[in-house]
Amino acid sequence: MAPLDDADVLVLSRFAYLRRRAGDLVLESPRAGALFKIRNPKLAAALVLLAAPQPVQKLLESFPGRALIALLVDCQILFRIDPARGDDLRRAEGNDDLVLWDFHDLLFHTRSTEGRHANPLGGAYPYAAVMAPLPAVRRPWPGKRTSLVEVPAAPSRCGLPQLLLERHSVRGFDAARPITLAELSSFLAGTARVQSTWEGKLEELGEDSPVVSYAMKPYPGAGGAYELELYLAVDKCDGLARGFYHYDANDHALVAIDVPAPAFEAMLTGAEFAIGASATPQVVITIAARFGRISWKYSSVAYALILKDVGVLIQTFYLMATDMGLGGCAIGSTNIDLFARMTGLDFCTEGAVGQFALGRGGEPDGPRGA
């Protein structure tokens, strides 16, 4: 530990946070190699002072000893500043690389990977004794159903290497020639339809293992969980009414969901704005995750795995759209609150994690590979 002088000025790291863990109040930081259980209310109150820079001499009035202050500095919960330099606190902490990190990003990065925490990691099935696993196939939505016609698969017009070369983001769509229901059916069947289902027990949990259901889809999914669901905001589709739908991947059907018109328009407008399109995309696909399907099994890496699955699925969308001669574009921003209001689903139960615009493309208007 570096020695501390009474005149040294310290401040709380912007990455430090207090939270309840079981019956304890803990002080943590993604930069720290340890966490601190705070059992003295006076100490918790003293930490509030450190939201602003404080000299060590003043801190000694509230902290139970110089050694604890030095330990917090060593763990990067606190850091020194030079008041004479008038340092910006963000730039004063760490190096220039650290300046680029926001609190939540660094926390997610360190807590969903190995190396900087001692929490359970990976397929530990932390909730197997608490609740049953979520079913592999989502319970169908009530409402009017539009059965999708079985369309024979057409021969691929080009091999994978050529598909990868031809793939590009399309932000302009041909309003005079909307995508057809048959094309949408083929697109969904080729990218996200349930191909098979089965059940089994987990060897890792022995005789007490619950029966877990599984489903196979065309794209690879972490642990075979296939937690992703598709919701379609359809603006223009020949053969399908304008509206909001859930794709029932097991029955290969679209189920209409009644949503407020302003929310529906807001989703379409938001997608148009996000990709810089010249007009509303014909179909906006929201990728939602049933979070519990992944977190029931995985510790620490659950959300990271979901994001990886989203990336895999979006690439699958791109390749299928390219092969079918359609246009598509990944949408970088997703309004999780809007989706929650449209579906009535709690944002932490089944929430939006990605979006994709689909339709009959016009001329390429973005750099190839974007």
Image: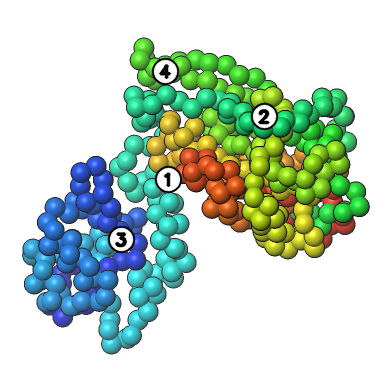
- What residue is disc 4 on? 210
Label 2 to label 3, Cα distance in Å? 43 Å
Q: Give the colouring mode of the picture.
A: rainbow
Quarter occupied by residue 269 = bottom right
- Work out whether 151 lies above or below 208: below
Q: Is residue 303 above or below residue 203?
A: below
- Dot 2 and dot 3 residues touching (CB under 8 Å): no
Q: Position of residue 22 (x, y in %)?
A: 24, 42
Number of residues whose C-alpha sits closer than 10 Å to that of mark 4, classed few (under 14), some (14–19) or many (20 or more): some
Task: Decide which of tag 4 and tag 3 comes sooner along the chain.
Answer: 3
Image point 34% across, 27% down: which residue? 130
Dot 2 corresponds to which residue?
249
> In the rendered view, would you say 291 is above or below 362?
above
At 17% from the left edge and 67% from the top edge, which residue is drawn?
46
Instruction: Provide the residue designation for mark 3.
Output: 16
Q: Earlier in the sequence, mark 4 or mark 1?
A: 1
Type of the residue with mark 3: Ala
Q: CA distance from mark 4 to mark 2?
A: 24 Å
